[in-house]
């Protein structure tokens, strides 16, 4: 009979594989670039996270060591994936949507990133 640690590690590996499969399937089946963005950034990130958690559990429960490499990879992954998705989405909007097609911005400065007034000559 398998021990609890083996079942827990196998659970995270299977979950990681399922998230990776769903993310890859979404990348293939969705039609537009903005729709395709969700597959790799959401589901695949969770899949890689589950596999890394399984690796950390294996090192801790089976090998009796603490592995900080997987923890750092997970932290880096969860910090960079949303930023990358934001950059890809902004690039898509800039390249494919005309400024005239955008709705009003409710700001006197238009579609700027910040609502700060433009800098004066003395700054």
Image (tube, grey):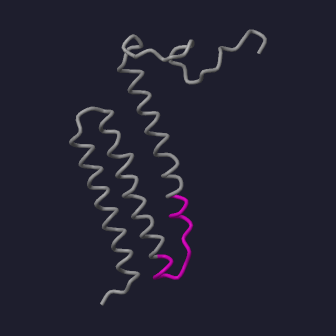
Residue farthest toward the front in the current orientation of the protein: 106
96 left or right of 21?
A: right
Residue furthest to the left in view is 29
**x, y percent for residue 82:** 47, 43
Residue situated in front as seen by the camera: 113 or 32: 113
Q: Is residue 23 left or right of residue 119?
A: left
Residue at point 44%, 76% (across, down) = 58
Decide: is 88 above or below 48. Answer: above
Q: Majority secondary structure of the magenta segment? A: helix
Q: Is residue 82 above or below residue 53?
A: above
Write the residue at 40% across / 58% down.
48
Depth check: give the residue in front, 29 or 65: 29
Q: Position of residue 123 (x, y in %)?
A: 76, 15
The answer to which image quadrant residue 35 occupies is: top left
- Specify whether residue 67 is painted magenta: yes
In the image, is residue 22 above or below residue 84? below
Residue at the image position 31 percent from the left and 57 percent from the top: 19
**Which residue is more in the foreground, 91 or 42?**
42
Magenta residues span 59-73
Q: Position of residue 77 (x, y in %)?
A: 48, 52
Quadrant the N terminus occupies: bottom left
Q: How many marks?
A: 0
**Quadrant of res 121:** top right
Is 77 part of what is drawn in magenta?
Answer: no
Where residue 26 sits in the image (x, y, percent)? Answer: 26, 45
Is residue 74 left or right of 122 when viewed as pictured?
A: left
Residue at horizontal 46 percent and vertical 82 percent from the top: 62
Residue at the right extreme? 122
């Amino acid at each position: 009979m398998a021990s609890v640690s083996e079942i827990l590690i196998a659970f995270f590996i299977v979950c990681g594989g399922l998230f990776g499969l769903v993310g890859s399937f979404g990348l293939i089946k969705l039609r537009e670039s903005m729709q395709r963005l969700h597959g790799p950034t959401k589901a695949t990130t969770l899949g890689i996270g589950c596999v890394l958690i399984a690796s950390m559990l294996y090192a801790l429960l089976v090998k009796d060591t603490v592995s900080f490499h997987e923890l750092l990879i997970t932290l880096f992954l969860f910090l960079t994936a949303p930023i990358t998705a934001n950059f890809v989405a902004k690039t898509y909007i800039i390249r494919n949507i005309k400024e005239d097609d955008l709705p009003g911005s409710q700001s006197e400065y238009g579609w700027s990133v910040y609502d700060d007034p433009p800098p004066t000559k003395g700054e």
